[in-house]
Amino acid sequence: MIFNKDTAEKTAELLLQINAIKLNPRNPFTWASGWNSPIYCDNRITLSFPVVRNYIRDEFSKNIEKQFGKPDVIAGVATGAIGIGILVAESLGLPFVYVRPEPKKHGRLNQVEGYLQKGQNVIVVEDLISTGNSSLLAVEALKEAGANVKGMAAIFSYGFEIASENFKNANVDLYTLSNYENLLPLAVAKRYITEEEEIALQEWRKSPSTWGK
């Protein structure tokens, strides 16, 4: 996983400020997977804050070209990354497509929506990386449509080992604006959490599926 420390800290601070990231080890959240979690991240909220969404757009635009070279197309993963993906595509002056979780059951049965030509270089934009499974399914759909996927750029990653393994096995380079590793020290320094709560948050990432049970 590729990231810039200054960008990672600034992005984490903005996400905390607008409550896109909530930290609550004492009263954990329950994910759709059934996992208990002391953190909840909803990066769709960034779209409601112009200063934050513009910062994310600009950092994506600058770093996508730096890390991967300028692509032919930006692809957003539905639904969370459609909005920010469009902003990035507009900033770079590029076409935009988005990828559904699965093909439509009617009409043209599309999974990739928009105009995509075979052989075009694509960067996938994602809002959040947990295990990476759903993100990499989008990559597979783009490849099946004939795209040359150059890499993925995400706003935030929990930094799970399984995600690193999944991206490595899929041979997909991942760039993130921020991540769990940079979030926690910043959250302590800015007094969003105590040092004791930081320990609990560190323990959760070691075994998220069994934490709190």
Image: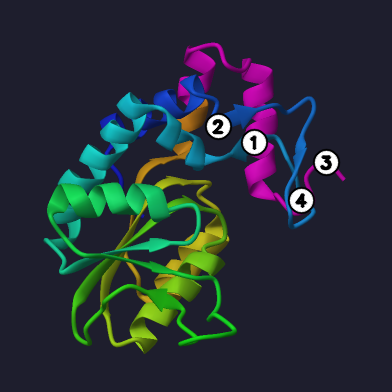
Where residue 156 appears, as percent x and y from the top left, is 44, 44
* Figure check: 27 above or below 63: above
> Are circles 2 and 4 on residues that touch, CB within 8 Å?
no
Kind of residue at disc 4: Trp
Point out which mark residue 212 bears: 3
- What kind of element bears circle 2? strand
- Residue at the spot 48% in from the left edge and 20% down from the top edge: 17
Q: Which label sits in the foreground, 2 or 3?
A: 2
* Figure check: 115 above or below 190: below
Residue extent of the magenta highlight: 185-213
Q: Which residue is mark 1?
A: 39
Circle 2 residues within 10 Å: few <14, some 14–19, many ≥20: some
Q: CA distance from mark 3 to mark 1?
A: 13 Å
Q: Which residue is mark 2?
A: 21
Point out which mark residue 35 bears: 4
Circle 3 residues within 10 Å: few <14, some 14–19, many ≥20: some
Where residue 198 appears, as percent x and y from the top left, is 62, 25
Q: CA distance from mark 1 to mark 4?
A: 11 Å
> Is residue 107 toward the left or the right of residue 6 in the image?
right
Where residue 154 appears, as percent x and y from the top left, is 38, 51
Q: Which of these two is toward me, 69 or 46?
A: 46
Kind of residue at disc 3: Gly
Q: Which label sits in the foreground, 2 or 4?
A: 2
Q: CA distance from mark 2 to mark 3?
A: 20 Å
Q: Which label sits in the foreground, 3 or 1?
A: 1
Circle 1 residues within 10 Å: few <14, some 14–19, many ≥20: some
Mark 1 and mark 2 lie on one chain; the one further toward the N terminus is 2
Q: CA distance from mark 4 to mark 3?
A: 9 Å
Q: Which label sits in the foreground, 1 or 2?
A: 2
> Are circles 2 and 3 on residues that touch, CB within 8 Å?
no
Q: Quadrant of the N terminus?
A: bottom left
